[in-house]
Amino acid sequence: MNEITLQIEGMSCGHCVGQIRRALARVEGLQHCEVKVGEARVIYDPKVSELGDIVEAVKEAGYDVRPAGRAA
């Protein structure tokens, strides 16, 4: 399993958190996620999905996202 923390821009409330959770729930191989305003911690199976799949799911939900610690 791989674990990644994502910085998510554009989130401002609990509704946004719910949108991100629902988007991530559709990613195959996702084992666990914790979402709070501005951040998500995700554990996923790299044999089933890639980081790009997770990032794309968040982007499709309408948010800017990048792995924590990386410049935009």
Image: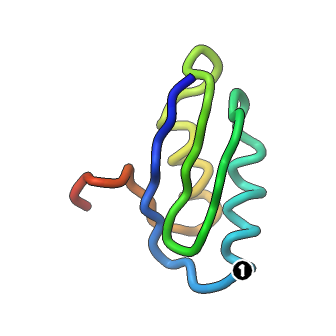
Residue plotted at (72% across, 58% down):
21
Q: Is residue 4 left or right of residue 43?
A: left
Closer-to-camera residue (10/35): 35
- Tell me where residue 41 appears, x and y as whole percent: 55, 50
Q: What residue is at 27 percent from the left and 53 percent from the top?
A: 69
Residue 49 percent across, percent down from the top left: 60, 26
Vertical arrangement, residue 30 with respect to residue 40, above or below: above
Among all residues in the image, which is located at the extreme top?
47
In this rendering, the count of numbered labels is 1
Q: Which residue is mark 1?
A: 14
Position of 29 relative to 41 (above/below): above
Q: Quadrant of the C terminus?
A: bottom left
Residue 64 on image: x %, y %: 45, 65
* Residue type marked 1: Gly
**Image height of 50 relative to 47, above or below:** below
How many other residues sit within 10 Å of disc 1, few (<14), some (14-19) or many (≥20)? few
Element class at badge 1: helix
Coloration mode: rainbow
State the image quarter where residue 16 is shown: bottom right
**1 displayed left or right of 14:** left
Q: On the image, which quarter does residue 7 sit in? A: bottom left
Outermost residue, bottom side: 12
Q: Quadrant of the N terminus?
A: top right
How far across and down, in percent of the image, does residue 47 sit?
59, 14
Residue drawn at x 48%, y 35% as measured from the top left: 51
Residue found at the very far left of the displayed protein: 71
**Can you say whether 52 is above or below 21 in the image?**
above
